[in-house]
Image (spheres, rainbow, N blue to C red):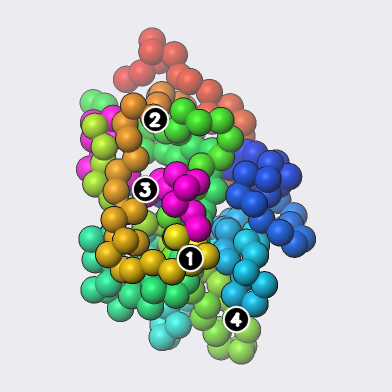
Amino acid sequence: MCGRFALKSPPSLIAERFGVAGPLPNLTARFNAAPLQDLPVVRLNPDTGERNLHLLRWGLVPVWAKDATIGSKLINARCETLTEKASFRTAFHKRRCLVPADAFYEWKQAGNVKQPYAITTTDNGPFAMAGLWEAWKNPDGLWERTFTIITTTANALLSELHDRMPVILPSAQWPAWLGEEPVSDETLRSLLRPYPAPEMRMWPVSRDVGNVRNDRPDLLDPLEQTRLI
């Protein structure tokens, strides 16, 4: 699964990396981004054909939902069942997006506690997690836009922490995923595979990342091995 991540890159770098156009939202570095927060997402504008960067709330709320509370249960979507689940089926076909991140966190059972690890790619700059987005009209008649992060089976590196990991898409696959070029469902599903383990790295970090109120740069600092429990 993916329940926390970090995005510390400045908006200008994110815009350059993802080739987005138009005004950028007012972003601040996030070192402990969590579900139900408004976070930057890259989407394709169907009117202009350009990529835009918008703030959407993490936790997908389907258009048919009676209330927004379902979003807390839909922060992730399993790639194997995207076309089977009513919550994700339409978004998979029509509303795919990219979720920029510099790292994400996963926990490993270590004795009586869970030790968090930060995980990233070996590329410089932010990477893209595959996502889906939806629009839901709240009781006040206002549209709320939300997203979910797609997960797949863990690669050899991540499998010692968890059996799932977020789908990370190389830049060459972004046009297909965003809908900038026609692709079949079969092709889309073929993109949702584990990122190569040799192209990723991870390190233990402070357990302070477990508290969503903590959002500091040092949360990404490697934890000394002598402090591991």
* Separation (CA) of disc 1 from disc 3: 23 Å
Three-letter amino acid code at the position of disc 3: Pro
Q: According to the image, label 3 marks what residue? A: 166
Residue 217 in the image: x percent, y percent? 61, 31
Q: How far apart are the two marked residues, 4 and 1, measured between alpha carbons? A: 28 Å
Kindly identify which numbered label has been placed on residue 181.
Answer: 1
> Which SS class for mark 3?
strand
Q: Residue at 52% x, 77% y: name it.
A: 135
- Residue beneath disc 2: 200
Kindly report which numbered mark, 4 or 2, lies closer to the viewer in this rendering.
2
Instruction: Please state which amino acid type lies under the numbered disc 1.
Output: Glu
Using the rendered view, name the quadrant where residue 94 is placed: bottom left
For the residues marked 4 and 3, what is the alpha-carbon distance in whole angstroms?
A: 27 Å
Earlier in the chain: of badge 4 and badge 2, it is: 4
Residue drawn 45% across and 82% down? 63
> Disc 4 vs disc 3: which is toward the camera?
3
